[in-house]
Image: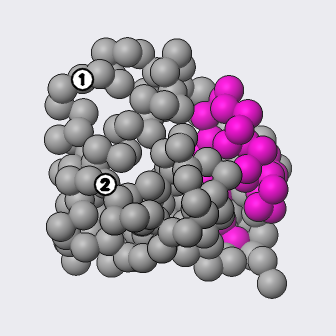
Amino acid sequence: MSSLFTVRRPRESDVGEMARLHVRAWQETYRGTVLDEVLDDPGFVLQRERMWTALVTEPRYTSVTVAVAEHDGALIGLASAGPVSAGRTQAGQSMPDLQLYTLYVLAEAHGSGAGAALLEAVLDGAAARLWVADPNPRAQAFYRKHGFEFGGAVQVDDGVRELEMVRPARG
């Protein structure tokens, strides 16, 4: 795949493709970590379509930034970020204002720069927090490359162990 892609804000007409991309990226990334029944659930795409429709169209989500990466007329990645609850990280640092909620790029587009472009499109250099699946060494290395460090907190979400990562604002 050539590295030519466009990062833009999604339109309501994108949400079906966003949902299919989200599910496909989960299947590519989490097969063997997340139960097959979850990854292959026939309703999974519809659940994600409802989620993306809400994030893209509903006024109550205006504090959430969503971006998609497009190549040759097809979506290859998506990302979202928004407010994080106040508090402190396990390491005692102040909690950043933003949390990266999602960042997925299809395997065929790994290494294209789309992930980095999406990350900055939704965070714009701000201090941020995220949760990354463990194990997921590729994603963890990607986030470290972009200034994130392990914050020390661990959670289990939908049966998946996740590690907190945080980064300061980027100048």
Disc 1 residue type (three-letter)? Asp
Magenta stretch bounds: 127-150
Distance, label 1 to label 2, CA atoms, is 17 Å
Q: Residues within 10 Å of mark 2 (few under 14, many from 20)?
A: many
Residue 161 percent coordinates (x, y): 60, 27
Q: Nearer the viewer, mark 1 or mark 2?
A: 2
Q: Residue at x 65, y 62 (%)?
A: 113
Disc 2 residue type (three-letter)? Met
Colour scheme in use: one colour
Residue 131 percent coordinates (x, y): 60, 45
> Is there any visible trace of residue 81 in the rendered image?
yes
Q: Quadrant of residue 135?
A: top right
**Residue 131 within the segment the image draws in magenta:** yes
Residue position for label 1: 41
Residue 103 percent coordinates (x, y): 52, 53
Residue position for label 2: 18
User: Is 153 positioned to the left or the right of 10 in the image?
Assistant: right
Query: The residue tagged with tag 1: helix, strand or loop?
Result: loop
Q: Residue at x 61, y 52 (%)?
A: 130
